[in-house]
Amino acid sequence: MKVAIPDNWMATIRKLGAERHKLHQGHDTSRPLSELYAALDNEVIGLAGEYAFSSVFALMPDWEVRPGGDNGIDFNVGAGTLDVKTARKPFNLIVEVGTTPADILVLAGWDDKTTTVELIGWETRAKILMAPRKDFGYGITNHYIEAASLRKMAILYDHVEKWRRAS
């Protein structure tokens, strides 16, 4: 499912991305995975993914600017947590080895030309932590699951609704 980001929201996302970029400069957790794209771009792309997910699932994104970041949690939904991983080339859902991810991880794809986000698929923390590991060439070893092997987004609605009812 694709979500177009309206211009007024893109302006907000760019402003917040710049704030986060400035706050996180030099932090170990703020590493662009490609020299082609600045960390600022990574912040904006991540926020766009969170916006898209929030608009589809009727959730409020947590866009508070924190020096230590969001600890890999984009959404708290009653009994569970979610993290949206957004990339220009969303071939794999990746989670850095040694980190503690959210209960559910969602892969999203960003398109610069159309300012759209495609919500591709999702998986549970347990499954991603059992997934194979690989360094994709940036000196960071990640657990990964190919996009084609992820669970369908429509199934995630049931999980989110159960969590809402549990709260």
Image: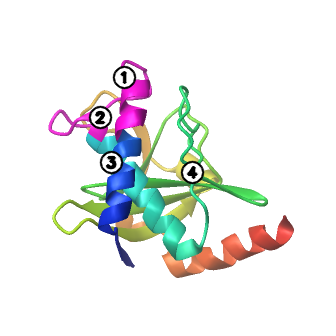
Residue extent of the magenta highlight: 18-40
Mark 3 or mark 4: whose residue is earlier in sequence: 3
For the point 49% across and 66% down, the residue is 53
Mark 4 or mark 2: whose residue is earlier in sequence: 2
For the point 56% across and 56% down, the residue is 61
Determine which residue is flagged by label 1. 25
Nearest the viewer among 65 and 93 is 65
Mark 3 or mark 1: whose residue is earlier in sequence: 3
Q: Based on the displayed image, in which of its 4 quarters is residue 166 positioned?
A: bottom right
Give the label, 3 or 2, closer to the camera: 3
Mark 3 or mark 2: whose residue is earlier in sequence: 3
Q: Is residue 163 left or right of residue 4?
A: right
Instruction: Answer whether residue 33 is magenta in the image.
Output: yes
> Dot 1: few (<14), some (14–19), or many (≥20) neighbours within 10 Å?
some
What kind of colouring is applied to the model shown?
rainbow
Does dot 3 land on a helix, a strand or a loop?
A: helix
Q: Residue furthest top?
A: 26
The location of residue 63, given as percent across then percent down, is 54, 47
Mark 1 or mark 2: whose residue is earlier in sequence: 1
The location of residue 43, given as percent across then percent down, is 36, 42
Query: Which residue type carries mark 1?
Result: Gln
**Whether residue 41 is situated above or below residue 159 in the rendered picture:** above
Could you tell me which quadrant the N terminus lies in?
bottom left
Could you tell me which quadrant the C terminus lies in?
bottom right
Q: Which mark is residue 74?
A: 4
Give the label, 3 or 4, closer to the camera: 3
Query: Which residue type carries mark 2?
Result: Ala
Q: Which mark is residue 14?
A: 3
Does dot 4 land on a helix, a strand or a loop?
A: loop
For the point 57% across and 51% down, the residue is 74
Instruction: Answer whether residue 66 is magenta in the image.
Output: no
